[in-house]
Image: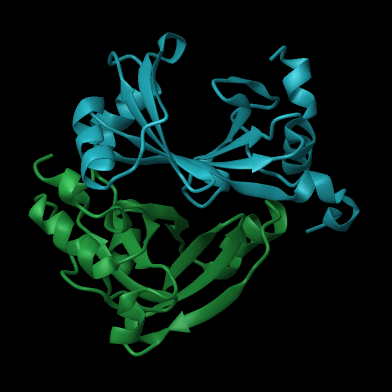
Chain colours: A green, B cyan
Amino acid sequence: MTGTSAVPEHVRGLGRVHHVAVVVRDLDASLGFYRDTLGLEVDTVMPIPSDRVTIAFLPIGESKVELVSPTDDTTGVARFLESKGEGFHHVCFEVHDLAETLTRLAIDGVELIDTQPRKGAEGPVAFLHPRSCHGVLVELIEAPGGPAWDALGY
Amino acid sequence: MTGTSAVPEHVRGLGRVHHVAVVVRDLDASLGFYRDTLGLEVDTVMPIPSDRVTIAFLPIGESKVELVSPTDDTTGVARFLESKGEGFHHVCFEVHDLAETLTRLAIDGVELIDTQPRKGAEGPVAFLHPRSCHGVLVELIEAPGGPAWDALGY
């Protein structure tokens, strides 16, 4: 881990599991389990037309379960669903300074899907490739008040 | 959701994401990413001989990342690794009364892998079948002080 001791603490620290995302075929059917049977509350249900998905956020403690359902068959999420079926899609960790975190991860050899913060529904986000994360698609989101919020015009 | 309105609140409420579990081929190699590169602390590394795995818990906020590596090729976790490769294995939610929660879930038609609480490393646990959870292997763990702790002799 060459050089990590020189990395400022605020760049290293992960705050919390922001959400765990599950790809589902039918959002209403999945709410029948996660909301009605398991007993989670529903915070938000919203279409994300740019991503061709509809999502629901269900808070639990300081985290959320995100249900993601594709609205057509052209996207990566739709192909994931066709090839693998319903199930885990990604986990999202909160960081304090996303741009600096991405810089450090790139130096450490992590394969980045997004090399800089981009605008997500709940804040600046970036994805890391599962090849670098032992099979897990990892999303990072910047905590409210971080520098990328201003930079992306939230 | 027939009858859920009659279910006591303490049976319904999920407290937090207790952990997200990732199956990995080599525990040390995966710590190279999750601890050394991503910056998570390591709380525990321990063999679970009865399950033929070695696990590591890495706290993040009120949750943990659990890394699970099989120690031989005879277990379900080992077969998971061989057939699907490294990646998400299960998510664990905390509940207040595990036995009552399982009873209610069974009434609601959820397929239970464990029909009653069993002794886990960190408290009483039970798994729900992914067929009932939209592709996700869900583990439930009882919060400290719950009735199954006494019943299982912690």
The quadrant where residue A33 appears: bottom right
Examine the rendering and report whether any part of residue A119 can be seen.
no
Quadrant of image for the N terminus of chain A? top left
Residue plotted at (74% across, 50% down): B13
The quadrant where residue B92 appears: top right
For the view shown, which residue lies furthest in the top direction? B49
Examine the rendering and report whether any part of residue B80 can be seen.
yes
* Residue B46 horizontal side relative to residue A3, left or right: right
The quadrant where residue B5 appears: bottom right
For the view shown, which residue lies furthest in the right direction? B6
Q: In the image, residue B94 lies at what x, y percent?
A: 63, 41
Q: In the image, residue B129 lies at what x, y percent?
A: 55, 38
For the view shown, which residue lies furthest in the bottom direction? A153
Q: In the image, residue B83 lies at what x, y percent?
A: 26, 33
Quadrant of image for the C terminus of chain A? bottom left
Height in image: A32 above or below B22?
A: below
Count of picture labels: 0
Residue plotted at (55% across, 68% down): A57
Residue plotted at (37% across, 28% down): B56
Q: In the image, residue A96 lies at what x, y percent?
A: 36, 64
In this rendered view, identify the residue nearer to me: A148 or A5.
A5
Height in image: B106 above or below A149?
A: above
Height in image: A52 above or below B85?
A: below
Residue plotted at (49% across, 48% down): B61
Height in image: B126 above or below A133?
A: above
In this rendered view, identify the residue nearer to me: A82 or A57.
A57
* Residue B140 horizontal side relative to residue B1, left or right: left
